[in-house]
Image (cartoon, rainbow, N blue to C red):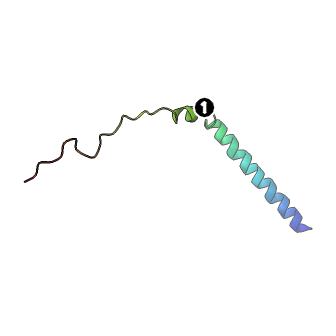
């Protein structure tokens, strides 16, 4: 019977830690911009990189 009391205490403490983590994430702004990441993936912000190959072949010896 005492094992059940330990398990209840552990379950309550884990639940409170999860609630605390959720409230911390909510307070720190983790859920402010939910659509931003979905829209950012559609647009390319970086300029194209130059190609690694030269445009003209090198002159032979």
Camera-side residue of 30 and 49: 49
From this viewpoint, which residue is outermost toward the left? Answer: 61
Quarter of the N terminus within the rendering: bottom right
Q: Tag count in the figure?
A: 1
Quarter of the C terminus within the rendering: bottom left
| Residue 54 placement, left or right of 5 | left
Q: Position of residue 46 (x, y in %)?
A: 40, 35
- Dot 1, how many residues are within 10 Å of its Cα: few (below 14), some (14-19), or many (20+)? few
Camera-side residue of 21 and 37: 37
Which quarter of the picture shows residue 25? top right
Looking at the image, which residue is at 82% across and 58% down?
9
| Residue 53 placement, left or right of 2 | left
Vertical placement of residue 53 versus 48, above or below:
below
Vertical placement of residue 13 versus 33, above or below:
below
Q: Position of residue 34 (x, y in %)?
A: 62, 33
Vertical placement of residue 4 versus 27, above or below:
below
Q: Position of residue 26 (x, y in %)?
A: 66, 37
Vertical placement of residue 43 versus 10, above or below:
above
From this viewpoint, which residue is outermost toward the right? Answer: 1
Looking at the image, which residue is at 66% across and 42% down?
24
Name the residue tied to disc 1.
Answer: 35
Looking at the image, which residue is at 71% across and 45% down?
20
Q: Position of residue 32 (x, y in %)?
A: 62, 32
Camera-side residue of 33 and 41: 41
| Residue 4 placement, left or right of 15 | right
Q: Secondary structure at mark 1?
A: loop
């Amino acid at each position: 019977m005492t094992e059940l009391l330990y398990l209840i205490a552990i379950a309550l403490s884990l639940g409170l830690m999860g609630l605390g983590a959720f409230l911390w994430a909510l307070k720190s702004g983790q859920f402010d911009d939910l659509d931003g990441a979905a829209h950012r993936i559609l647009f390319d912000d970086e300029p194209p990189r130059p190609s690694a190959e030269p445009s003209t072949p090198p002159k032979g010896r």
